[in-house]
Image (cartoon, helix red, strand yellow):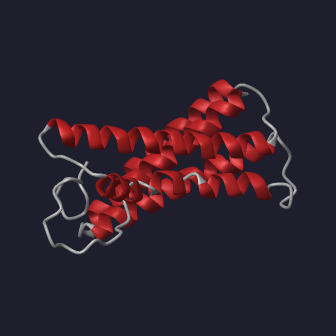
Amino acid sequence: MCNPTGRSHGSRERGAPRTRRTDYAGAVYGSLLAASVVATAGALGTYPRLQLVLLLVITGLVFWAAHVYALLVGERLVGTSWTWTEVRRVAGHEWSMVEAAALPAAAVAISPVLGLGLGTTPWLALGVAVVQQVVWACLGGAAAGAGRGQVAVEGAVNLVLGLIIVAAKAALGH
């Protein structure tokens, strides 16, 4: 996976400033992961809200750690050595995968305030995850300099991916 400059994570030029850039791909992936967690958790039964919030956060953290590890090992295999500074840099860059679990988890947490029961709460969280996935995809396309048409295509592709998960939940979950 490349960052918005087109360079791999390990190829930062010496002396280049360290800036935190949003990892749009990680945010899209994390949103899709959150949608999948909500869809499958609901398919197995009604989860109490706290369990679903914890499941979203823990799954986001585990996939983030696995992704960071895979990136670092992959870079090492091609001859790029890494230090703890590099580990922290990659981990920070990929943090958007975990952040993507925050809104669906917050939707679950506030669902009682909205008057939602345990049966409808996962649908709210799933909707939030799909919407944020589309928004992250569009923001990523725009940040990369894509034209309006390409941004629209990226949003549409991500909407279709999210709707596949929604359809699977609808068909298999209830």
* Residue 145 appears anywhere in the view: yes
Viewer-side residue, 144 vs 62:
62
Q: Is residue 173 above or below residue 70?
A: above
Instruction: Determine the residue positioned at 75% across, 39% down.
Output: 51
Quadrant showing the C terminus: top right
Instruction: Determine the residue positioned at 33% across, 53% down.
Output: 84
- Taking the view exactly as shown, the residue that stands out farthest to the front is 84
Viewer-side residue, 119 vs 95:
95
Image coordinates of residue 99 in percent, x first then y, are 53, 57
Instruction: Determine the residue positioned at 34% across, 51% down.
Output: 87
Q: Is residue 107 above or below residue 47?
A: below
Image coordinates of residue 45 in percent, x first then y, are 77, 27
Which of the 4 image quadrants contains residue 78? top left
Locate residue 97 relative to residue 154 in the image: left or right: right
Please state the total of marks drawn on the protein image. 0
Image coordinates of residue 129 in percent, x first then y, are 57, 51
* Residue 120 appears anywhere in the view: no
Viewer-side residue, 13 vs 100:
13
Image coordinates of residue 67 in percent, x first then y, are 38, 41
Locate residue 43 relative to residue 35 in the image: left or right: right
